[in-house]
Amino acid sequence: MANPTATATTHDASASQHHPPHLKHYFVSSEQQFDAAKLGMWLFLITEILLFSGMFVAYTVYRVWYPEVFTIGATELNPWLGGLNTLVLLGSSLTVALAIHAAQTDKRRTLVRYLVITVLLAGVFMVVKYFEYTHKFHLGIFPGAAFSYAEMSQPYVPIFFSIYFVMTGIHGVHVLIGMGVLSWLAWRAHKGHFGSEYYTPVELTGLYWHLVDIIWIFLFPLLYLI
Amino acid sequence: MNDTFWLPESASTMSPEIDSLFYFVTWASIILFVGVVAATIYLAVRYRRQDEVHVPQPVEPNTIVEISWIILPTILVLIIFNWGFKLFIDQSVSPPDAYEIQVRGSMWNWEFEYPNGTVTVGELHVPVDRPVRLNMSSVDVLHSFFVPEFRVKQDVLPDRYSSVWFEATRTDTFHVFCTEYCGQGHSEMLSSLVTHSQGDFEEWLASAGTDEDMPLPELGQQLYEQRGCAACHSIDGTAGIGPTLQGLYGETETLADGSTVEVDEDFLRESILEPGATIVEGYQNVMPAAYGNLSERELSGLIAYIEQLQ
Amino acid sequence: MAEAKHQKPKAAPAGDEGHSDHGDHGDYITHDTSIKSWLLSVDHKRIGIMYGITTALAFLVAGVFALLVRAELFMPGETIMTADTYNQMFSLHGIIMVFGFIIPAIPGFLGNFLLPIQLGAKDVAFPRLNLTSYYFYLIGVILIVVAMVVGSVDTGWTFYTPYSARTGPAVLFLTMAVFIAGFASIFTGLNFIVTIHKMRAPGLTWNRLPLFVWSIYATSIVQVLATPVLGITVLLLFLERLMGIGIFDPALGGDPILFQHFFWFYSHPAVYIMILPGFGIISELIGTFSRQRIFGYTAIALSSVAIAMLGFLVWGHHMFVSGQSAISSIIFSLITYLIGIPSGIKIFNWIATMYKGSVSFKTPMLYALSFLVLFTIGGVTGIMVGVLAVDIHLHDTYYVVGHFHYVMMGGTVIALLGGLHYWWPKITGRMYNERLAQIAAGLIFVGFNLTFFSQLVLGTRGMPRRYYDYIDEYTFLHQLSTVGSWVLGMGLFLVLGYMLVSMFRGEKASANPWHAATLEWTHTGRRPSPHNFHRTPLVTHGPYDYYLAGEVFGDGVGNGSPVGDTAPSEEARSH
């Protein structure tokens, strides 16, 4: 895997002549730094998938055990709002991809614009989520023991909503974290930190954001539609 | 099989077979272990460092040696697996004609119900030379039913049934342990297991549960021992998780809310049936509500027993 | 510093001059001694040491709990504490030992300190993430302490539902603690995988990696893949306890067995997070103190990875009596045997490494030899509890307690102690008292066996674990075990004592007191400089090619012409 001579030469070259500001001293070259960051991000995404897969397993087990409960529970979820949110997130995935492209082609203003649009779309998603949640709380649909929705008194219905709240809740936390990171990137992009030479944070956040999107694409049909 | 260094004397039809497997693995392990230790000592001493600057020539890798010590252990463990697997199937499938007893685990008691409706607590009676199947469930948390001499164990789950079977081979009294951690009284969740010959068992079953002849305080004492009261309430005045029963009757106790109450029959009765209703100052509300199924006579027995402990 | 150097004129290998001790800013400790420079350091060595100190404190606390638990069991009935206190004590012993000590100890301490140096890198790939990892771990430990103050953590380290959903509120703090410490574990693993892939020095090919690096690599894979599942499990348990979401509570329609599946899906691989780094240390020790190339290097390296992978498929062997289906038990049992084989291969290879070597009996090697003995017992007792029919009898008895202590303590802790003694001169720049160290190693070996062999016998005789009280026939074996724990404790406190003395008064060590051949010994000074190397080292031989490591023995050539032997082997050179 390693190419000894090549690496050694790069090191000498970079140490003596050119040392870009973004290059950390413990890396030999920008390529090495970028490769490391990218591999790290992919590993992180794997841990995220495993985190959610635990919940998907729980979902599957209870769906098999209590299929009727899942059918009843899903009627309380509004597929139109869920569908709207799906479109919003898909759109934000597109804008984040365009942002990466803008960074690669040194278009600073475009980069900032797409990052801001992505944050705004994520905001729309969260607002819709907020209305969905408050509507349920209003009806007495709470996770766990506090469940008090009279029209769904069948046994074990609370389990469906526990799973719903836990899965969408953790997903929502990921959206919020993504919004924070994207806003920070937009600010840095505004300051001109990124360009075709260095856009690692934008690309990696983009990867993260696609994952958040993909997870929602699984959550939506599983919870709202079937 | 007699009582040995490793295992308690076996007392069920399955145990000799399990023991043979146990000893097979043990002896294989001992041979392997002795081999490992001997090789380690021999090589370490034979090639001990004699010259501080000496650097020996590297030993060439030997593929045949390496492959052989991959293959040989694999064969050995597959033999062990196969043997264990076959026995496991025998253990899992109970004979169809087994005598069935219902078992309920609760914090921290074992309750046994026989086909004729007799219920015993903390004492399981079974006939020898006949397969017995226990259908078990728990009323609260996980428990596990374990009789070392029978080599059987099975977790007991709330809202679910699990089962275990055995066929006892000799008449004796054994211990039943709970082996799934279940809180404060986990290690006191014992029961005795009494094996009878067929005839004796029928006889015992016919007369069991009818303790009407027993004087009340004696019945109370028996219940005190069987139902695990001793885990929390001493009878010699030492403070435990709950108040001691010695001299309790007739005392005036301060309750958690500051009021006082005199300990009389009614108070004792309420405290047994609804432990959470009143809490004496300085104690936690931890007594299980599992005693609601005591009969009137049993309650009277317990109260009579407590009155006696002055 | 320099005087140690003069005795050995160290010719620089292959165009590299890696010694840092004539650097301008001193070594990694002396270049800046303010408290802040430690607490906010992103230097992998300092983070390693902070991990080392914190895990050592955790080990001390949990060890004292263990001694108290053993003291209580000296007699049946109440000896020194109530049932409630006892239950909290063994729970905390387990929780702190597992999450506070043994999982982070070797990767966090020795892994952080050594891995970048052994790779010839200046630091790990993500130094700030590394510091974050340490603080996440620290928060986890602090939450465990908070839970101790809040009281009534009496679930055992396994948190089985529904008991854990009902017992005291401290469960909330503990699940949070485990959740947060889990992040620390993930970050460390992720960091190490990237570092190993991307930061190796020129010439350091995969088959020249020290086996310690290989084992940390395998460990990191497990950390990254298994820990998220633990995260979601304890998060669900947290919500279960907080709001009663019902996923694991049968009273609400949930399934306690599902909790066990989730829990062991992490916690069985976690066993390999604990033991694999120990394997790595033992490989280094046996190589260096036998001055012989590790027999079956490839087999040992790949068996670590095999164990890491197979480790994900055996969790169900913790549940043979839980009520899972018989067919699952059978499959899990079969895979359990397959995983025993790579461990066996390692033992055989280590023993074979001594063949035609030059075996020294310095303290680290004494620990390595103890490891071979103790881990073999841990392994064969593991085969025993993997036997379906026999495990029915042994499950949840002291046999299991004895078995996993033989693996965890006889394996991991003994390896860690060996590693601590081995790398002590590199970390502190000082030597310890060899005589006392050998006595301590002896006490630990004897005390350990007394403590835990008695427990194996207790277990086969039917003594269930987590028992506060026991029937009289077990008294003698319990007393033997308790006395053993005192001997073991004495040995460990002796280690603590002479190590503290050594830190301030110890004789100054040379840069390579053991004549080892890996980069941390050959290319750094008495203590490494802040950035490890002034120039990236160029690696020209394998980690155990002592006869090629000219820089170790000062022949000035760097390859070939071994000291004390005549001709270098032609085959070995073609590595």
Image (spheres, rainbow, N blue to C red):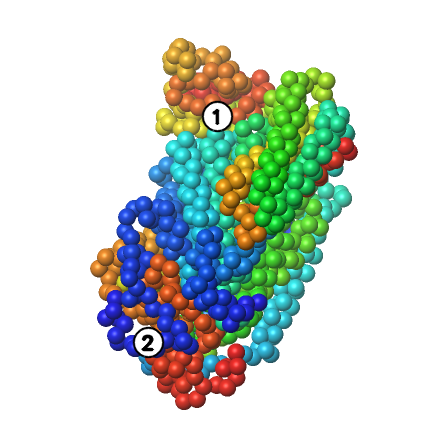
In terms of secondary structure, where does tag 1 sit?
loop
For the residues marked 2 and 1, what is the alpha-carbon distance in whole angstroms? 71 Å
Answer yes or no: is residue B143 visible.
no
Q: Position of residue B54 (x, y in %)?
A: 36, 82
Q: Quadrant of residue B24?
A: bottom right
Q: Which residue is mark 1?
A: B286
Identify the residue at horizontal 46%, vertical 63% (top origin).
A14
Q: Which residue is mark 2?
A: C10
Instruction: Please state which of residues B46 and B126 is positioned toward the viewer in this rendering.
Output: B46
Identify the residue at horizontal 68%, vertical 41% (top origin).
A94
Against C189, residue A8 (above or below) is: below
Label pair 2/1, CB-CB below 8 angstroms:
no
Q: In the rendered view, does B145 fall on the left or right side of C283?
A: right
Instruction: Please state which of residues C291 and C355 is positioned toward the viewer in this rendering.
Output: C291
Q: Chain of mark 2?
A: C
Identify the residue at horizontal 57%, vertical 65% (top origin).
C303
Q: Position of residue C377 (x, y in %)?
A: 49, 61
